Image (cartoon, helix red, strand yellow):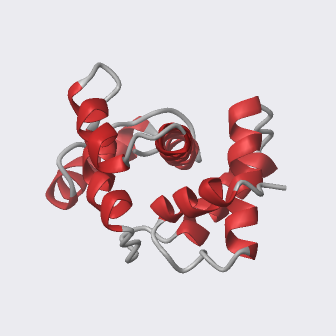
Amino acid sequence: MAGGKSEVFEKIKPILLNLGKSATLLGDHGSGNVAKLAINLFLGITIQGLSESVVFAAQNGIEAAALLPLINESAVGSGITKIKTPSIINRDFSPAFALKLLRKDIRLAEDMGLQSPAGLTLAQTLQAAIESGFGEEDMAAIFKQVEQGDNK
């Protein structure tokens, strides 16, 4: 994800392709950063939604270990739901991407004008999770905050 002048991008594109599996010019300077924030917004909203679904099911007698495979095989299953399923089932939130780093990205999006209801709710839940002491854990530890039920 890059932003800048096309001629510069084309010169460095081979280097970028050595660093990752794709390289895309998205627009002017800063566009790559906006794309990163947008992707992480979607990631956070997805993890919060997954957490809310699992907590709702548990409150109504369905264990995470039974629900998550169903989610993963349904139309709403995704790479991230499959990756984070073991974390939730085993309650192992060893950091792959720390919750505090996701909060930082959402704060940056807020600074750029983020106003969506889901995005602002995510920001609130992430902040509450940090205040609950989950900031150093994996972003999937948002599950523990949702489970506590205190997101203000």
Q: In the image as oriented, which residue stretches furthest toward the front?
A: 61
- From the viewer's perspective, is 149 left or right of 64? right
Q: Can I make out residue 23 in this image?
A: no
Task: Quarter of the image for the C terminus: give it.
Answer: bottom right
Residue 29 position in % (x across, y down): 57, 45
Q: Residue at x 77, y 47 (%)?
A: 110
Q: Residue at x 46, y 41 (%)?
A: 61
Question: Which sits in the foreground, 101 or 77?
Answer: 77
Q: Residue at x 36, y 70 (%)?
A: 96
Residue 71 position in % (x across, y down): 31, 32
Residue 37 position in % (x across, y down): 57, 47
Question: Which sits in the foreground, 130 or 90?
Answer: 90
- Relative to 7, say whether 33 is above or below: below
User: How many numbered marks, from 0 up?
Assistant: 0
- Relative to 56, say whether 101 is above or below: below
Task: Quarter of the image for the N terminus: give it.
Answer: top left
Residue 76 position in % (x across, y down): 35, 25
- From the viewer's perspective, is 152 left or right of 70? right
Q: In the image as oriented, which residue stretches furthest toward the top?
A: 75
State the image quarter where residue 67 is shown.
Answer: top left
Q: Can I make out residue 91 in this image?
A: yes
- From the viewer's perspective, is 127 left or right of 4? right
Q: Residue at x 73, y 57 (%)?
A: 107
Question: Which sits in the foreground, 149 or 75?
Answer: 149
